[in-house]
Image (cartoon, rainbow, N blue to C red):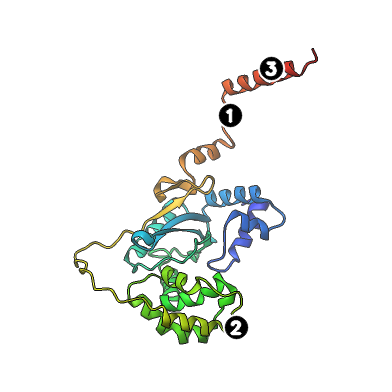
Amino acid sequence: MLPTRERYVAGFVDHLPDGAAMSVKQLAKQLPLYGQQAISTALKALSVAGHLRRVRCAVGAGDETRWVFRTFWSRTARDNEWWNTYLATEAATRTAAPVEPPAPTAVPPQRTPPQPTDTEPSPPAREAISAERTQTTALSPAYLALARLGRDDHRLGLSADDCTTLEPLAAQWLDRGVTTDYLTNALTAGLPAQIDSPVGLIRRRLIDKLPPRLPATASTPTDTPAPTRRLLVECTDCGLPGPPEALPDGLCHPCHTTHSAGGRPSPDPTQITAVKAHMANLRDLLKPV
């Protein structure tokens, strides 16, 4: 049975929608009963109990690679073997998936639940992974780049119909080898102070600033291995990354040792002596002459 604070935090996290922000600061804003330190301690306890794991995964390719932080949540407490198997399946899925360009901005830690049930999945949570990928790949990169413009600058907010109308023009840019970051920068650079028609401005820029088509480069050999999509578990306490098997209970070795000992390690006796000597020296200096 979890303590009251951990049950309170677990109940809130369990009802968050997929993809919700899961940083300690964000949770502390939404849970007024506890501060950031208490939330951090509760998340560590939930990690040790087998309810969550934090991971870092690389997205993109080459110079476009960035790290995305995610939190996997399980309503049912799972042991380390189950989590290692699930995360290995997740890493293998990302290796087989096509490389997609990263978003223009860093992605905050997000909750991605494996949707466990009382019956052990085999392989773990494969249905949830497939559903998540289907939702992500349903929209083209060109459409997503246009849809995100309003998130970056409210003056460029486009409706769903606007994005669908402009999607073919934006796709021409991506077909010529530019990235979504390049496309976004070209559409948002040097904007006027007031924009009366965002769709008209974006259409004009998509047509007028269309980049030239570069000659095709040498094709990649068919036997070139697919890029490895790395996935590292992050220590729930200190944030140190590592492979899943190296972080039992979601904690690195020093944090796991500290937690098993029931608290912080005792300070070095030599440090205590040095501090006492320093304080005595300060008191001597403050005495009146």
Looking at the image, which residue is at 60% across and 66% down?
Answer: 15
Whether pointer 3 and pointer 1 mark residues with C-beta atoms closer than 8 Å, the reply is: no
Q: Residue pushed farthest top? A: 289
Using the image, determine if residue 113 lies above or below residue 232.
below
Residue beneath disc 1 = 266
Q: Callout 3, which amino acid?
A: Asn
Q: Is residue 99 above or below residue 243?
A: below
* Residue positioned 47% across, 84% down in the render: 203
**In the image shown, does 101 or 3 lie closer to the viewer?**
101
Type of residue at label 2? Asp
Instruction: Work out how far the residue at label 2 is from the one at label 3, CA to CA, in angstroms.
Output: 70 Å
Alpha carbons under labels 2 and 1: distance apart: 64 Å
Which residue is at the front of the view, 21 or 166?
A: 166
Residue designated by label 2: 196
Residue 211's spot in the image, x, y percent? 36, 76
Mark before the other along the chain sequence, 2 or 1: 2
| Cα–Cα gap, marks 3 and 1 | 25 Å
Q: Position of residue 98 (x, y in %)?
A: 33, 69
* Quarter of the image that includes the C terminus: top right
Q: Quadrant of residue 220?
A: bottom left
Q: Which mark is residue 163?
A: none
Which residue was labeled with disc 3?
281
Left/right placement of residue 1 relative to residue 162 reads: right
* Amino acid type of the residue that numbered disc 1 sits on in the rendered structure: Ser
Q: Earlier in the sequence, mark 3 or mark 1?
A: 1
| Frontmost residue, 122 versus 176 | 176
